[in-house]
Image: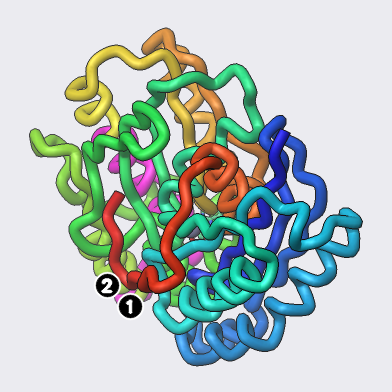
Amino acid sequence: MGIVLGIESSCDETAAALVTTDRRIVAQRIASQDESHAPYGGVVPEIAARAHAERLAPMVEAVMDDAGVTLAELDAIAATAGPGLIGGVMVGLVSAKALAMAGDVPLIAVNHLEGHALSPRLADPDLEFPYALLLVSGGHCQILRVEGVGRYRRFATTIDDALGEAFDKTAKILGLGFPGGPAVERLALEGNPNAVPLPRPLAGSAEPHFSFAGLKSAVLRAKESGRHGDADLAASFQQAALDCVLDRLRVALDAMGPVPALVVAGGVAANKVIRHTLERVATGRDMRFVAPPMALCTDNAAMIAWAGCERLGQSDPLDIAARPRWPL
Ligand code: KG4
Ligand code: ZN
């Protein structure tokens, strides 16, 4: 049995976790920076990097203390090395390098997207490769065929905004605050999803890619027209976004060939309407539906530590660079 320290700092969550190869999250800490970024309606990279620099070291110390584990007892230190906001990624990666050096422990540089892609296997020991993954968060919007560790085939990505970003921008238009997803979902409960005619960008196109910029602009125009209530706007936006996801997923799954499971991950997986609809899609295709617990769906360090567990035995050099862009 091995134990890995994971560090995550690529966006606005500072997180550290200890995870074992037999799928136990031994200790974890996470600090969100929502309040710091809320006045700006989105994540401000400079503020994020400074917050990571202040919080990360005490957080690592706390998880090591919680678990009663010393540096020398670790089998590896895994840190997000990209993609993400570069200042934050550098804080986490450089911290991991220093710890790896001090404890003479292997360093594993993890692609944040790989962390999301493999995290369902931490929660579900029965989830075998391959599986179809819909990864939908504030920064990512992809459909992948996860074939093994390091083996990912991307079927779809967004050509502009991510799905969570579209929720956040809609929330901003409706004056709902940040992060916007949960607020839009709540308000949508009171509205009519068919009240406002909104576009379904790329629906029907043969390539399974996503586009949400046009939808967001249409919400803005509808709001400015003054003809619709906010609850109807929220509900109609959510319905349009969901229709896009379903259409794009259908094309991607058809292209992918048979896979036994459909997995959803990323912050938008918290949305109950989206989650339940995806469950029906999976059932209709005779696929298992897997949605990891929310704490594992949103950005966290346990998924990075788990990616380290899946890669145990490998190591990266201490001069490995942080990467703002890093496709899987
Ligand atoms: O995975 P995550 O915590 O961080 C990123 O990597 O982006 O995802 C955060 C995103 C935000 O855009 C947030 O608005 C969205 O997930 N989100 C939701 C809901 N909860 C969070 N979107 C729609 N409905 C929700 N209930
Ligand atoms: Zn993420």
Query: Counting other residues with Cα less than 10 Å from the Cα at mark 1, is it few (<14), some (14-19), or many (20 or more)?
Result: few
Colour basis: rainbow
**Viewer-proximal residue, 11 or 111?**
111
Looking at the rendered structure, the secondary structure element under dot 1 is: helix
Return the residue found at the far top.
286
Rendered image: mark on residue 221:
2
**Viewer-proximal residue, 313 or 295?**
313
Q: Answer left or right for 279 relative to 69.
A: left
Q: Is residue 152 magenta?
A: no
Badge 1 vs badge 2, beta-carbon distance below 8 Å: yes
Q: How far apart are marks 1 and 2 (CA)?
A: 5 Å
Place of residue 156 in the rendered image (x, y in percent of width and height, measured from the top left):
23, 42
Residue at image point 23% right, 16% down: 257
**Viewer-proximal residue, 299 or 222?**
299
Looking at the rendered image, the quarter that the N terminus falls into is top right
Looking at the rendered structure, the secondary structure element under dot 2 is: helix
Give the magenta part as a residue range: 224-248
Q: Is mark 1 within 8 Å of ligand 1?
A: no
Place of residue 20 in the rendered image (x, y in percent of width and height, measured from the top left):
72, 40
Residue type of the residue flagged with mark 1: Glu
Residue at image point 54% right, 53% down: 267
Rendered image: mark on residue 266:
none
Place of residue 250 in the rendered image (x, y in percent of width and height, measured from the top left):
26, 27
Query: Counting other residues with Cα less than 10 Å from the Cα at mark 2, is it few (<14), some (14-19), or many (20 or more)?
Result: few
Residue at image point 55% right, 83% down: 48
Q: Is residue 8 visible?
A: yes
Residue type of the residue flagged with mark 2: Arg
Q: Is residue 235 magenta?
A: yes
Place of residue 89 in the rendered image (x, y in percent of width and height, measured from the top left):
47, 74
Q: Mark 1 points at which residue?
A: 224
Rendered image quadrant of residue 22 = top right
Q: Answer left or right for 31 relative to 179.
A: right
